[in-house]
Image (cartoon, grey):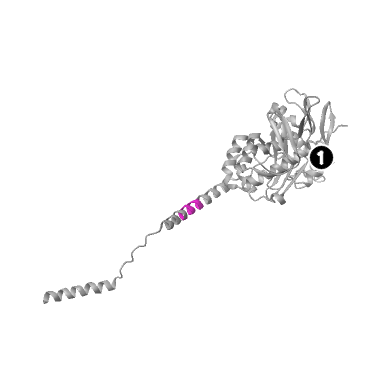
Amino acid sequence: MAQRGRTTRSTGSRVAGSARRPARKKKRARSPLGRLARILYCMLVALSAVIVVTYAGVRIAARPPEIKDDPPAAADNSPSGDQETEDSPAISEDPGPQRKEYTYTFLLVATDQSSGNTDTMMVLTYDTVNQKAGLVSLPRDTMINGVKESDGSHFYKLNSTYAYNGIEGLKKEVSQILGIPIDFYVKVNTRGFVKLVDAIGGVDFNVPVNMNYEDPTQDLYIHFNKGMQWLSGSDALKVARCRQNSYYDEASGKWKTYDAYSNADIGRTETQRNLLTAVLKKALSQPQNFATYYDIFLENVQTDLVMSDLLFFAEKALYFDFSNGLSTAVLPGDGTVTYHGWTYCYQLYPDQVLELVNTQGINPYTTDLTADMLNIAQKY
């Protein structure tokens, strides 16, 4: 009996203890979907951290480019040998035109596949503060008074400058025509343009004219109907290059050509500007492909921009509104001029060029340029 009593007390004690310590709940097994959600969440957190760190690194590395601007020298109106006296106070020097803050100019060129001349030449001025840009085409046959640095001989069309005097010679010539400094140059080969268009998945573009041109010697066959259509990289290059149509003349047994555009090469420069704008707009809408763009850039572009410059402009361009921020134009002139025996030179209209530079976002200065700042060749 005593043994049973002890057993009873002992049992009662265990029961009381159990009442004081609630029983642990059994863990519910997480479903496969729940485990997947947890993994995805952790991946998202990690990816967000990488993005934040990468963005911070880009912001640190993306520094505004340093430029060397040489404004026109101030005129010295003081008599020779005059010294400053109390009766003749010092005349302050004119510092020349002042640059807009963080506004840069670029020479954009593409070389001709057959001759090595610059088939496409544009100048871009980009105001990164106000997010405004001006893009102007320089016709390939723009009339100049060119001099070969190698032998002092003369040439009279702008597109020959690169072949004779290199990219620095071309920058100098363009700078003198427009009256502005050229801060940087970007020279792209045709392979790079094709790769970029393909990298963005092609581009929808309104082809402005019917294009039908064949040149078996260049293995070039261009056939596009006028109107909106999707263009691959190779298609886009053909549209950009086309300036003439061709047909086979049965009577003579020869291929003959005529201008694809009613205004000859001026029409092609407009197409090139519009096509470039469409490609850049789509490329900037896909920032996830920037690594691909950079690889294409390294392989196919020559430039004097450095890495920190590229990062700075890439960051700014992400916020650029092409619809409201970009002005495009072509330098006005007459493309039928013969100059020193060179036919079909494009003689610029100085007054109209000056107005365009000052009103279409090309002038990087805070004040308007004047006619004496431009150096435009004229046939008298």
Q: Position of residue 94 (x, y in %)?
A: 77, 43
Tell me: residue 290, above or below residue 220. Answer: below
Q: Position of residue 226 (x, y in %)?
A: 74, 42
Q: Give the labeled residue for mark 1.
A: 332
Nearer-the-camera pick, 90 or 75: 75
- Magenta includes 24? no
Left or right: 72 in relation to 292: right
Nearer-the-camera pick, 109 or 174: 109
Residue at 60%, 44% (x, y): give it.
311
Kindly indicate the quadrant of the structure image that contains residue 214: top right
Left or right: 162 in relation to 371: left
Question: Which residue extends farthest right?
Answer: 380
Residue at 82%, 28% (x, y): give it.
343
Q: Position of residue 166 (x, y in %)?
A: 70, 30
Residue 39 visible within the image: yes
Question: Which residue extends farthest front?
Answer: 250
Q: Position of residue 359 (x, y in %)?
A: 79, 47
Secondary structure of residue under mark 1: loop
Residue 137 visible within the image: no
Quarter of the figure that contains the N terminus: bottom left
Kindly indicate the quadrant of the structure image that contains residue 199: top right
Left or right: 214 in relation to 16: right
Magenta stretch?
Answer: 41-49
